[in-house]
Structure formats: structure tokens, C-alpha cells
Amino acid sequence: MKNIVYFDLETQRSAHDVGGWGHISRMGMSVGVTYSTARGGYAIYGEPHVDGLVQELQRADLVVGFNILRFDYEVLHAYTSLDLRQLPTLDMMVELGKHLTHRLSLDSIAQATLGVEKTAEGLQALEWFKQGRMMDIAEYCCFDVKITRLVHEYGASHQQVLYADRTGKHRTVPARW
């Protein structure tokens, strides 16, 4: 059985805090979450256990996420000398972007495709980190991983996902994964 690992992480600091988007590796991971199809469940990693997260990603037959090439992997590059972009990776944002002239958010796809919304946003997770509310971050990140998995599975099954355009009308975009 192929081990697909769905992955997302939250950070300790914002782009503003670290001097801009050119310094993503300075943001620090607060919580990382995976869902492994081989394990059939989730794993939650705090910063002290980031090595375990990197090892799990390395063992995956495929890592699936949303904006992980440009963001999540860059955050993790502060913790490892490995070039995580060399891992077998499906970044759904990148793949969907090949068919559109604009970027889509995971939330807009999840709402149109699955009828579900994210439970919070990254800026809220930053506030939770400052307040030491790590379980709230972990719960939020787990839900994002679940949405990522469901969008991926829907796209694989239907060869497309939906999103709402600026007028609110649902449109389709090919999902070739």
C-alpha cells in the first residue's frame, strides 16, 4: 500500500515578524501535523520533535499539501540540511495554479468542493502560540490536514475540484493527480 502523507504546519512568527516573505525559514514551527495512509491516522509534532516530522516526510511515498513547496518546506529548512523539495511531493496549490491565472486558497476550494470551511486562519494560530495554546493550534492544523486529504481524494476521484469565483459562482479546475 502506498504511504501518502498529508502535511501542514503552523509557525511561531509571521512574515512581518521576520522581515518579510524572503525569510520564511526564520518563522519557526509551532506545530506540524501529518496524516499517513499507511498508519491510518494523525501525528502531531511540536518543535522539539521536528526531527520525527522530517523523518516521516522522508519515508512517505508521496507528501501532499497545499503551498508546502514554497512555505511549509521552507519553514522546515531551518531544522534540517536536507532539501525537502526533493521529496516526492504534490503541492495542490502549484498543480491547480497551472490551470488558473490566480491563486486559490485551500478554504475556497474546500467550501466549494466539500461544503466545509477552515476552523481558523494562520494569524489566529500565531496568537494562540503567543498565548501558549498549543492544543488549539494542533486541533486547527489537524483539521487543515483533514481538509487537504479530502480535497486531494476528491480531486483524484473526480479529476477536478471546485472553487467560487469573485461573483460566488462555482467553477471547476482540473485536478490531474
Image: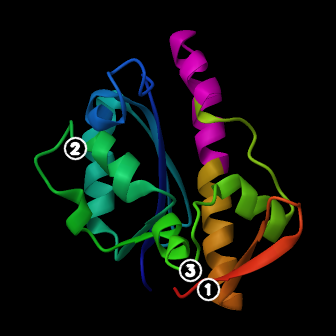
Label 3 is placed on what type of residue?
His
Label 1 is placed on what type of residue?
Ala
- Distance from disc 2 to disc 3, alpha carbons, whole Å, reads 29 Å
Residue 69 horizontal/vertical position (percent): 35, 58
- Distance from disc 1 to disc 3, alpha carbons, whole Å, reads 16 Å
Question: Looking at the image, which residue is at 52% across and 71% down?
Answer: 97
The region drawn magenta spans 123-143
Question: Looking at the image, which residue is at 59% across and 54% down?
Answer: 145
- Distance from disc 2 to disc 1, alpha carbons, whole Å, reads 29 Å
Dot 1 or dot 3, earlier in sequence: 3
Residue 88 horizontal/vertical position (percent): 30, 74
Residue contact between numbered discs 2 and 1, judged by CB atoms under 8 Å? no
The secondary structure making up most of the magenta span is helix
- Please give the residue where the numbered disc 2 appears in the rendered image: 77
Residue contact between numbered discs 1 and 3, judged by CB atoms under 8 Å? no
- Please give the residue where the numbered disc 1 appears in the rendered image: 156
Residue 73 horizontal/vertical position (percent): 32, 50
Q: Helix or strand or loop: what does disc 1 sit on? A: helix
Label disc, if present, on residue 99 of the rendered structure: 3
Please state which of the two labelled residues, at mark 2 or mark 3, is closer to the viewer.
Answer: 3
